Amino acid sequence: MSERPTRVAAVDCGTNSIRLLIADVRDGELAEVDRRMTIVRLGQGVDATGAFAPEALERVFRAADEYAEVIRSAGATRVRFVATSAARDVSNRDAFLEGIQARLGTTPDIITGAEEAHLTFRGATQSLPAPGGGSGLPGPYLVADIGGGSTELILGDASGVIAAESLDLGSVRLTERHVTTDPTSPAELAAITRDIEALLDHTTVPIAEARALVAVAGTATTVAAVALNLPEYDRAAVHHAQLSADALREATTWLTTTTRADRAAVRAIHPGRVDVIGAGATILQHLFDRTPAPTLTISEHDILDGTALSLA
């Protein structure tokens, strides 16, 4: 007999957004109950100051108050809050930890890059067809999670993670470091590219061994929505979408050469990503160019799903 479902709540707080997934877990499978995302820009100014800005903490705590009520109403019996690159090295992280503990009743896990990689890989690949199975994607997979402050690269197959690394590349980090004009100038885009190439040149993850590239999280899903010309964001259309090389390049070019107003007019782009999506798309483009994968696969499932599974 199968086990009774366990209702769990997973919260993932990154550099740009905080997200909640409430799901019923049974026999290692997730049944989604509620999923939501709030742009909080926790990493605002962290690259320059090494500390969370007071207004950024206020935004996170407001979102946490909302999520706490949702979790209580849903009756989740297990809760896990994970925080990634933005919270690892800041000078005032105790204020962040204490504020979340007071609101959600659980101590945030400031997870290592290695654990982040394992959770992300599990979440991203759980619902993909088995490597080499029928018309499914061939393995090994390279899973890429492009966040606001870091990019996780995870190479793995049906047996699990083979190699992983967290790189100091993110849409918020690169935008704050290099972009001051609207639209982004060629010189600024060149500086972003130099940073990306420098880190990809020295990654310990053997990118060229991947036979499929699976990109997760907000940067990738937003790029997909633009490439697919969606009138508004549609999770069902984006999840497991396959983008050709030409479609990805066209979307990246548009996102990096248009004005902020042009991007803001596209309903499929979340307002909180309008300023930083160009840098994020550039990371994705350069990563894709280094893989032998013929297409880019987009997944709506990521570290949030892996965290929920870890609670079962």
Image (cartoon, grey):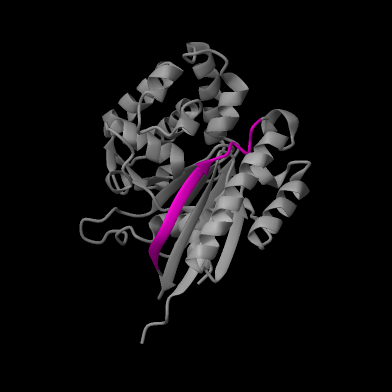
Comparing 260 with 195, the one in front is: 260
Q: Is residue 43 magenta?
A: yes
Side (left or right) of 294 relative to 199 = left
Residue 150 sits in which quadrant?
Answer: top right
Residue 175 picture location, percent across and down: 56, 25
Comparing 309 with 133, the one in front is: 309
Identify whether 67 is placed above or below 208: below
Residue 206 appears in the figure: no
**Residue at x 67% of width, y 40% of height:** 58
**Residue at x 48% of width, y 12% of height:** 186
Residue 31 picture location, percent across and down: 37, 65
Identify whether 1 is placed above or below 185: below
Residue 260 appears in the figure: yes
Outermost residue toward the left in this view: 134
For the N terminus, give its image quadrant: bottom left
Residue 92 sits in which quadrant?
Answer: top right
Q: Is residue 273 magenta?
A: no
Comparing 259 with 261, the one in front is: 261
**Residue at x 35% of width, y 31% of height:** 267
**Residue at x 35% of width, y 45% of height:** 298
Comparing 138 with 152, the one in front is: 152
From which residue to which does the magenta span run? 30-44
